[in-house]
Image (tube, rainbow, N blue to C red):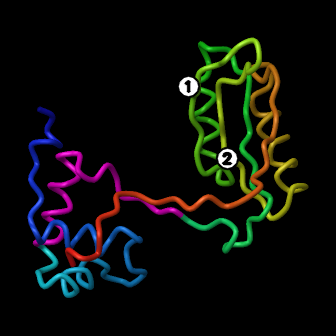
Amino acid sequence: MTETENTALDDLDRKIIVATQSGLPLVAEPYALIAEEVGSTTSEVMARITRMLESGVIRRIGAVPNHYTLGFKGNGMTVWDIPDDKVKQCGEMIGALDFVSHAYERPRHQPEWNYNLFAMVHGKDRTEVEQKVQQIADLLGEDNRGHEILYSSRILKKTGLRLASATK
């Protein structure tokens, strides 16, 4: 039995999950507001969220900005053919750029797909994204053995764990 399977959720845990599953409230003290909503204390809510994170019930808590709302409409997933022995180093370098939200290694699927490094580049429009991609290409130098930009065609709603609100 895994640690996650061994972690029982009680009514308060479920209320906390329901209260946070659409995101944390955008206030100075989000956990205090959640505590008020679920009838608990801020410290208890934080302790339970920490326990659920440690046990794997909750995988992570992170910001998920809506780039379109922020004015970044030219978003493109860049894919790069990098020497396998340099992909980690190059990925860290690309991921540190302020216009890249995430960079990660993926397996190649040759001969159709030779790319092993993916990086999401954000810009106001496609021209800006292309300029930023050129900056990455210049930064990578000879380690860039080819790349493409795959532009977003629609926004996919990102969601996490969902519980029925009836348990609220």
Residue 94, percent from left and from top:
65, 38
Quarter the N terminus occupies: top left
Quarter the C terminus occupies: bottom left
The kind of residue tagged 1 is Lys
Q: Earlier in the sequence, mark 2 or mark 1?
A: 1
Is 168 covered by the magenta stretch?
Answer: no
Is 53 covered by the magenta stretch?
Answer: yes
Left/right of residue 2 with respect to residue 72 in the rendered view = left
Q: Kindly identify which residue carries mark 1.
A: 88
Q: Kindly identify which residue carries mark 2.
A: 120
Question: Element under label 1?
Answer: helix
Residue at 81% across, 42% down? 133
Using the rendered view, name the quadrant where residue 28 is placed: bottom left
Left/right of residue 163 with respect to residue 48 in the rendered view = right
Residue 31, percent from left and from top:
25, 77
Mark drawn on residue 15: none
Residue at 80% across, 30% down? 147
Left/right of residue 95 with respect to residue 11 in the rendered view = right
